[in-house]
Image: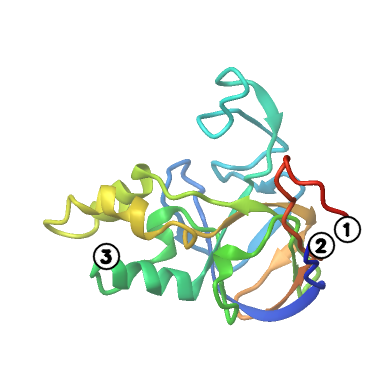
Amino acid sequence: MVEIIPARTLKGQVAGLFSALDGGFETAAVAELALSYDGIAGDRHAGALRPSGAREPWYPRGTEMANERQLSILGSGDLQDIAKALAIPELPAQWIGGNIVIEGIGQFSLLPPRTLLMFDNGVTVRIDGDNGPCRYSGRAIAGHVADRSDIEFEFVKVAKYKRGLVGWVERAGTILPGEGVTVRIWEQWIYPPAQASLAL
């Protein structure tokens, strides 16, 4: 039999809000985050559509597709774990292009696809999936730490399953620092191997 894990609800809080309004990779702190159905107006990841890239090898590079990566959401505990593994004092979300930092949810980056982040002021963000760590982010961190060029490669290893999540705006509105967020996790199960014939 396949194990079905029941739906759950968790509670967290917004610890930081950031945007890349200059078109660059790194983000900067903002007093609030106004979200439309295109994401953050002026942010490099805004838009209902985006071109495919290395993460979508099944499409020719640059193919127009739905933008499920409007937002980069990070867990405060995961950032602390990565910083410790890299032996640096801290890892600010801005260095790796984060838009929202959530505190109070353990192992935040392991939240499954379809999870809903329902913010107290009315915004809902639907999680598409995890944001795999890459050398580009590692290089950005290394640029802030003297004599640590190794971080470019080390980050990819230590940040696996801790790099945060990407998602898109399901309900528009404005997120404020410190507001609460309800995390709604759907029922979960592991699809059985193809060679197995298992009944639910």
Mark 3 or 1, nearer chain start: 3
Residue 160 point in image, percent of width and height: 44, 56
The alpha-carbon separation of the residues under discs 2 and 3 comes to 41 Å
CB atoms of marks 1 and 2 within 8 Å = yes
Question: As shown in the figure, which amino acid type bears the numbered disc 3?
Answer: Leu
Residue 127 point in image, percent of width and height: 69, 56
Residue 192 point in image, percent of width and height: 74, 50
CB atoms of marks 3 and 1 within 8 Å = no
Mark 2 or 3, nearer chain start: 2
Residue 99 point in image, percent of width and height: 55, 59
Mark 1 or 2, nearer chain start: 2
Question: As shown in the figure, which amino acid type bears the numbered disc 1?
Answer: Leu
The alpha-carbon separation of the residues under discs 3 and 1 comes to 43 Å
Position of the N terminus by quadrant: bottom right
Question: Which residue is at 68% across, 43% downward?
Answer: 68
Callout 1: helix, strand or loop? Answer: loop
User: Could you tell whether 102 is left or right of 20 in the image?
Assistant: right
- The crowding category of the residue bearing disc 3, from other C-alpha atoms within 10 Å (few below 14, some 14 to 19, many at least 20), is some
* Most foreground residue, 197 or 92: 197
In the rendered view, tell whether residue 87 sits above or below residue 41: below
- The crowding category of the residue bearing disc 1, from other C-alpha atoms within 10 Å (few below 14, some 14 to 19, many at least 20), is few
Q: Name the residue under label 2.
A: 1
Q: Name the residue under label 3.
A: 86
* Most foreground residue, 122 or 86: 86
